[in-house]
Amino acid sequence: MDLHLKGKVAVVGGGSSGIGFAIAQRLVTEGAKVLIWARRETLLQEAATRLRAIEGAEVVICAADIKSPEDNLRVIRAAVAAFGRIDILVNNDGAPPKGALLDFDDEAWHQALQQNLMSVVRMSREAVPHLRAAGGGSIINITALSVLQPVAGFGLSVASWAGLLGYAKTLSLEIGPDHITVNTICPGRIDTPLSRRSFTRVAKGDAEKEAAARAKLDLETPVRRIGKPEDVADIVSFLVSPLAAFITGTTIPVDGGRSAAI
């Protein structure tokens, strides 16, 4: 299916690996031009090389720290400098540290809010004038299923992303008349380099324990497998396409049915 994304310009956070890379890859395959950004320039260069192997790919990189206000703005400006416009903004990164809520001090809360909420506020504010100039566009926020179904130990993410849900819904109301859609994706368990490291750490190097933990998660998921980054990338590519122009203000779990809510 042609998603009519040829020539569109996308900014994709966390684009060096995992979900961010899969999103960038899907968009490039559809003919979009992409700026990927993350903290580590070496990994970005490697990801860009892989993406440029796709026929017709136009990819640039920008090494930046999501918690830095200056870097948030610099990423948007780098995309405009490279391609002259922006049509798609995908806000995606990792998550704050895990732990009991009462153990975190004010600085930890400040950092979590910078990472999960304020980066989106700043980048959206900087990008929206360019989306308007392009005649419309899309903003996608990648969070996690825990924001809809809280898990003990994930409180910094849950609380900061809950604020993001409110922000995204309100923004969708305010910029809908400009033909700009705003949607939020809540992935469940996804097989990424980060999640694999988590399995290894918990299993303490025991391959059998690691395999058992993976199998347990597969069984706990109604579709009997954890997700792939491509599962998230597919719905993102649809939501940023003209085919989804009537979908905005939504919060969508992509979790293989793990969510317990109706």
Image (spheres, helix red, strand yellow):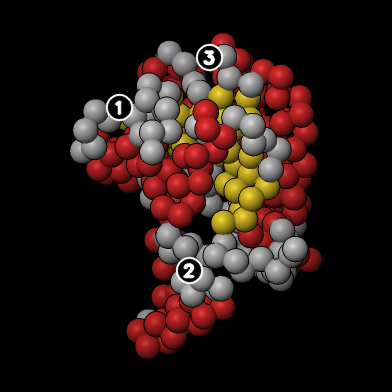
Q: 38 or 234: which is nearer to us? A: 234
What residue is pinned by disc 2? 226
Q: Amino acid at mark 3?
A: Ala
Query: Earlier along the polypeptide chain: callout 1 or callout 2?
Result: 1
What residue is pinned by disc 1? 58
Rendered view: 258 above or below 135: below
Local secondary structure at mark 1: loop
Left or right side of 70 for 215: left
Q: Are marks 1 and 2 in contact (CB under 8 Å)?
A: no
Rendered view: 218 above or below 45: below
Q: Quadrant of residue 52?
A: top left
Q: Position of residue 158 (x, y in %)?
A: 71, 57
Query: Earlier along the polypeptide chain: callout 1 or callout 3?
Result: 1
Q: Amino acid at mark 1?
A: Glu
Q: Nearer the viewer, mark 1 or mark 2?
A: 2
Q: 215 or 76: which is nearer to us? A: 215
What residue is pinned by disc 3? 134
- Between the C-alphas of marks 1 and 2, the distance is 31 Å
Local secondary structure at mark 3: loop
Q: Position of residue 19 (x, y in %)?
A: 45, 51
Q: Position of residue 192 (x, y in %)?
A: 42, 60
Q: Residue at x 60, y 66 (%)?
A: 257
Local secondary structure at mark 2: loop
Rendered view: 19 above or below 149: above
- Between the C-alphas of marks 1 and 3, the distance is 19 Å
Q: Amino acid at mark 2?
A: Ile
Left or right side of 4 for 71: right
Q: 160 or 162: which is nearer to us? A: 162
